[in-house]
Image (tube, rainbow, N blue to C red):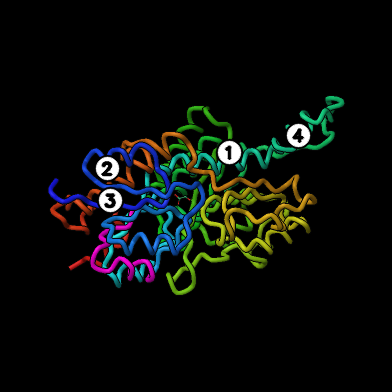
Amino acid sequence: MTKKFRVFATCDIGESLELLRKRGYVVEVYPKPEAPPKSLIIDRTKSGIDGLITTLRDPIDAEVFEAGKGTLKVVAQIAVGFDNINRADANRYKVPFTHTADVLTEATAEFSFFMLGVLARKMWTAEHLTRENQWGYWHPYLPFLGDEVTGKTIAVIGTGRIGLAMIKKCAGFDMNILCYDPAYQNHDYVKAIQEMMNLRHARGIQKEHTWIKYTTFEEALKQADFVSVHVPLLREGESPTPTYHLFNERTLRMMKPTAYLVNDSRGPVVDETALVKALRENWIAGAALDVYEKEPLPADSLLRDPAIADRCRLYPHFASAARITRLSTDPNKGMAGRCVQALMDVLEGNYGGDVTKMPYVVNKEAFAK
Ligand code: GLV
């Protein structure tokens, strides 16, 4: 390599950074576990870095791109979601930005499924009961019962990579599956899942003959026992099909009172005030969340209300937090490895230097001829 590239990472992403250093890059890392102030990101960008490694906690917009004018060549985000990066601004300043799709698909989908299980079978409440020595007897229905997942109907809202992986996992639990996506439908995948369901039934692997189909948002909400959310956060004006507050008073009221909601996509897709009301007033049976309108979850969030603790599971934006998923240096396995590969692709001019051919670049439209 002839040029020494300079990179600033807004957090430590592990050994993959060593890989860059070994290639001659000068890498500076924000050393604290929490996100750096925006002023510091701007300051480091202004210092003439070539590449900026970001997390979903960092607001990347015109101010940052302006600071990097003439020098900043790539923003490499370690996440699949990129709602923290202003795409229109990146395009205006012609800075490609990358993400780490695919490598976290299965981890995120399995986390959705596990949250669903913990919620439905009341595993958190049951463990507390045991730990707190409140387990006084075995009884057919006391002190409470949960709901079985096997054989139930799930609505998968959003059938991109993670939604499709969730469908695959739910099919393995003999669930009927209602699919909804405002923008992207994969009928081939749904057909293949139905064929698998048919075979499992024909061979006696599952007793009930289950089904899968696309439907409307309303029908999905009305019929499902579980609703699992897998959409990107798109605010008004960012898309013809925005997802901000897709779950609100009106739509939460469409769900069955026995149904559960699971969300590890993005917090603002769910109106938390409406959800708290739905849980307090039993419009729905429960919810499990891994993402929030404001992160980390504020101390005074109403979601912490002890009155709904038995039916509201809360996790710390943790769905992709599996060792290999997060940190493997292999770009085909780990977010860190993929993030660094994406950065190198742009800086080192891989794919003939054609940004539109680079697999991890998101805003290809800004570079299309
Ligand atoms: C995590 O939320 C991600 O977008 O990767």
Give the amino acid at mark 2. Answer: Leu
Label 3 C-beta lies within 8 Å of the nearest ligand 1 atom: no
Point 51% across, 35% down: residue: 172
Label 2 C-beta lies within 8 Å of the nearest ligand 1 atom: no
Give the amino acid at mark 4. Answer: His
Dot 3 and dot 2 residues touching (CB under 8 Å): yes
Residue 20: assigned label: 2
Q: Which residue is disc 3 drawn over?
A: 343
Say what secondary structure mark 3 lies in.
Answer: helix
Mark closer to the observer (3, 2): 2
Give the amino acid at mark 3. Answer: Leu
Q: Earlier in the sequence, mark 3 or mark 2?
A: 2
Residue 21 locus on image (x, y percent): 27, 41
Q: Is residue 137 magenta?
A: no
Crowd rating for badge 4 (residues with CA inside 10 Å; few <14, some 14–19, many 20+):
few
Q: Nearer the viewer, residue 280 or 139?
A: 280
Crowd rating for badge 2 (residues with CA inside 10 Å; few <14, some 14–19, many 20+):
some
Q: Which residue is disc 4 drawn over?
A: 128
Point 71% across, 54% down: residue: 284
Mark closer to the observer (1, 4): 4
Residue 160 visible? The answer is no
Q: Earlier in the sequence, mark 2 or mark 4?
A: 2
Residue 227 visible? The answer is yes
Q: Which residue is disc 1 drawn over?
A: 114
Q: Earlier in the sequence, mark 1 or mark 2?
A: 2
